[in-house]
Image (spheres, grey):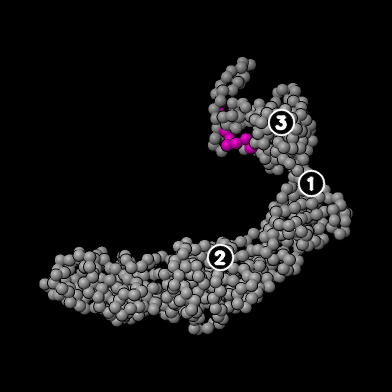
Amino acid sequence: MFFQADAQADSTQTTTSADQQVALTTNVNTTSQNTNYQNLNQSTDNQQETAQASTQTAVAGANDGVSLNEHDVQQANNKPVIDTNPSFSTGQYNVTATPVSSSNGTNGAASLNTAGLSSRNINFLNSIHDGALNGWRQYGVLPSVTAAQAILESGWGQSGLATQGHNLFGIKGSYNGHSITMPTREVYGGRSVYINDAFRAYANNNESVQDHGRFLAVNSRYHNLLWQTDYRTVTRLIQADGYATDPYYASSLNAVIERYGLTAWDREVAEVNTGHIDNLSVVGNQINIRGWHASDSYNSKMHHFIILLDGNTGKELYRTEVNGDYRQDVQNVYPNADISGWGGFNINIPYSSIFAGKNVQVVSRYTYNTNGEINGGKDLFFTPVSLNANTGYLDNMSLDAKTGTINISGWHAADASLNKGYHFIIIYDGSKQVELGRFLVESGSRDDVAKVYNIYGANKSGFSLKLNFNPALAGDQIQVISRYSNSQNGEGNYVDYWFAPKTFSENRAYLDSLTVSGNQLHVTGWHAADQSVAKPYHFIIIYDATTHREVKRQMVDSLSRNDVQKVYPNIYNDAQSGFDLTTTLDPSLNGHEIRIISRYSDAKNGEGNKIDYWFNPVKVTIR
């Protein structure tokens, strides 16, 4: 009898090319992953030590790949798997900074006269502080008056509207679609009646305070009080504009402002001393420092200095007087400051080892002294920026089956690479935590990187390496480390970037046909596996899935499969992955399910180190 079946069980085709079908598999002899790490470009400064391996020089553009040192490979083979989740690096890159403090003092309730206030009332003041300041910045409503109104109209946040909807000012309607219904007294035809009405509901007190500022700004009758800096003027105007009918409303607000010193909040916004560092980074061989400093403590006789401090120790590293770099955007925001638009600066200073790897803090200073020492004016300290940018990207790390090499290319830029003239690519087994080889490479031109990243050496940060595939590279998690060192052997002072690991463990196959004629079994198919490297013996094993035993194994020639290579160009041995076997089946297998196993082994008997692919079971009939 002639019997034919497709081992995939979902197709009636007897012959299928590699780009049409791939069989399901379970690998019982090794842990194979058909999905490699695809994101290789996350990095943190990894503190792992790499045992020094022998150093080779990788010649750029060479057709032949470089090889791992066999001694290092043998050492790795003798080590067990230590880490199944190797660490890697994430890029460090930040070029901006904000003021450490732009208010020159305490804020919130701490800046007020809170003597005699309960903790509940102090917490209330803290809950409206930011909203009151933002009301000035966005709408020009004086913070002291806003705070006094909130205190009076909500009873220190204890009214029903305040406790249930954070509505401190009794504004009706809805806010972002949110409202709360409350009883309210209205006068109709001279008669006082109570009705239920909708009032705006807020997520917190600050939101209510900011909306109060908007309410005053969008109602034209209150425009005369906006951007006024004297609280008595504002309270007089808000009463005259009809905000409240109480004839003593203005004097009540004044009393609250004076009792609790609420003008301290006015000073936080009215006394300008703020700025921003837009860029602090290495551009070529220069440090670029660009930003602005607006201040009310300035006159035209003063000098503007930029001072650089070590952000960790406070030690001064550099100072220079700067000319104004006009900033219309800053002038628009702070039109009344003593200096704003002309407080811009954009300077370049030489990058040297005194800055490399340090946290650098910028201080902008206005002073009468020509040497930059303090004399009048105010300092503005910005948060430190690390000149230790360290980032990279692995453009490619793939196996080229035609050449039998892993092609590696990418870039690595680091501020700390200054005075480190040797660029190494280190191949590291992350699973066993052992170095497999290090190779001295030429840093290639990467103008694309320099356009995006202001990091020292970004324009010469590229690297490429062609590495001969080796059994040590198959199956484990392999990492690329880019290292800049001041030593020819890659030790000494160095900065590393550890790319995420990749596992070369592709294991794919397909059974083109399985036929039984009489007691003759004929099977054809292909099996490509990264871990077949250095395993020259190809076996087809017949496994009785009914009785769970191997019944036959036979060595076969690995046949040419150009169709497989076209579809899977990055799997080792893809071009020579085919097999074709005719063999005799014992009649006792009649009615049993058999499984075909394709195996690559480094031993002539099919044992030793091996990689298997198990095809789905097929029931056979033998006559």
Q: Residue at x 64, y 76 (%)?
A: 487
Q: Mark 2 points at which residue?
A: 48
The verdict on residue 443 being magenta is: no
Q: Name the residue under label 3.
A: 148
**Residue 364 place in picture, x, y as percent:** 78, 55
* Circle 3 SS class: helix
CA gap between label 3 and label 2 equals 59 Å
CA gap between label 1 and label 3 equals 25 Å
**Residue 543 appears in the figure:** yes
Q: Which quarter of the image is occupied by the N terminus? A: bottom left
Say which of 510 and 169 sits in front.
Answer: 510
**Residue 268 place in picture, x, y as percent:** 75, 42
Say which of 359 and 202 sits in front.
Answer: 359
Q: Residue 336 carries which label?
A: 1
**Residue 208 place in picture, x, y as percent:** 63, 35
Q: Quadrant of residue 609?
A: bottom left
CA gap between label 2 and label 1 equals 55 Å
